[in-house]
Amino acid sequence: MTKDKSRVIQLVNQLGPFETLFRGFSDFNGIKFMVVGTDEFTSTLEIDENSKGDVSKLLKSPNAFMGKKLNVSFTNYTKEDNIEYQRLLKVTIRK
């Protein structure tokens, strides 16, 4: 396997430099967002009542999980303001 293919596999599987880490929470206009990222990039994922997995654990004790590795799945959607957002589908704290 070439080096480029192995980087793609790392990206898809959120491994190595693409490991997604828990960075905290933020609120905007009454909407709760989970902040996730790598050492170089961060992103916010909107949390709603359909978000599954370890969301409640993270909300209860965010400081205990700061910087912990996560597996996340999300979907993109566009609101009435024509801005694209990401909605958290599921988060799992990696062991």
Image: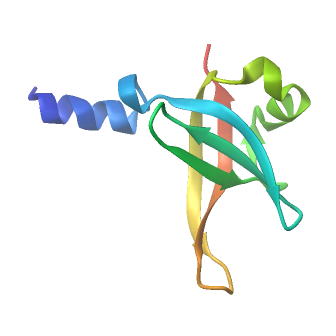
- Most extreme residue toward the top is 95
The residue sitting at 61% across, 20% down in the picture is 94
Quarter of the image with the N terminus is: top left
Q: Is residue 91 above or below residue 50?
A: above
Can the viewer see residue 50? no
Which residue is drawn at the image coordinates 48% and 42% (left, top)? 41
- The x, y position of residue 36, in whole percent, is 61, 40
Q: Residue furthest left?
A: 2
Q: Depth check: give the residue in front, 92 or 42.
A: 42
As drawn, 86 above or below 13: below
| Residue nearer the viewer, 49 or 28 | 28
Left or right: residue 13 versus residue 55 is: left
33 w.r.t. 24: above or below: below
Q: Position of residue 22 (x, y in %)?
A: 65, 31
* Residue 12 image position (x, y, % from top left): 37, 38
Q: Quadrant of residue 63?
A: top right
Residue 12 in the figure: left or right of residue 51: left
User: Picture quarter containing residue 55?
Assistant: top right
Q: Above or below — where is 4 with respect to 48?
A: above
Q: Give me the residue at 48% from left, 30% from top.
A: 39
Q: Is residue 66 visible?
A: yes
Quarter of the rendering occupied by the C terminus: top right
